Amino acid sequence: MTDKKINKPVDPAHLTELEQKHVPMIEAPELVLTGQPFIVKVTVPHVMEQSHYIEWIKLSMHGIKLGEVNYSPSDTSTTAEFTVTIPEEVVAVKVLEQCNIHGVNVCGDCGTKSVLTDLIAVASCNVHGLWESFKRIEVMSKIQSEGKPCKWE
Ligand SMILES: [Fe+2]
């Protein structure tokens, strides 16, 4: 059965053998625009056997559920693809993670706003419990300008 504790890699740059098989790998653009759908691909390189398999993969962003894929032992792939659209309100929400020095990033040239936030993936192995990883992305408002990504300094 699953354990309530969520496992996270101790050293993401040097995963242990157990971590390599369970920690979700998240592929997503570094920079996305509000209101524009993008693909997030989450892969867990784990065996799928009757007695040992990945039960589900969930994706969220700061407590907001973005999607969930459930698996059975007969499934051969443990790659989940989520189509995600982040609403414009996100760049104005203060509770979202922002730069610890600059807060919401506002470009001095074009006034475009953006925030940094984390996509969080959790995978459940029926034997080894829950495993979490995250990928930090920048969400940029498309309202004021679409064309100028600005750098967090
Ligand atoms: Fe496992």
Image (tube, grey):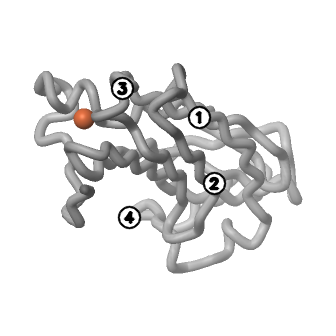
Tell which circle, 2 or 3, labels the residue nearer the N-terminal end: 3
Residue beneath the point at 44% across and 60% down: 99
Amino acid residing under circle 2 = Gly
> What is the distance, in whole Å, between disc 2 and disc 1 at their CAs?
9 Å
**Mark 1 and mark 4 residues within 8 Å of each other at the beta carbon:** no
Q: Mark 2 points at which residue?
A: 67
Amino acid residing under circle 4 = Ile
Tell which circle, 1 or 4, labels the residue nearer the N-terminal end: 1
Q: Name the residue under label 4.
A: 101
Left/right placement of residue 50 relative to residue 121 reads left
Amino acid residing under circle 1 = Ala
> What is the distance, in whole Å, between disc 1 and disc 3 at their CAs?
18 Å
> What is the distance, in whole Å, between disc 2 and disc 3 at their CAs?
24 Å
Q: Which of 113 and 6 is in front in this view?
A: 6
Amino acid residing under circle 3 = Glu
Count neighbours of disc 3 (C-alpha within 10 A) and say few if under 14, some if 14 to 19, many if 20 or more.
Answer: few
The total of numbered circles placed on residues is 4
Q: Which of 50 and 12 is in front in this view?
A: 50
Q: Nearer the viewer, mark 2 or mark 4?
A: 2
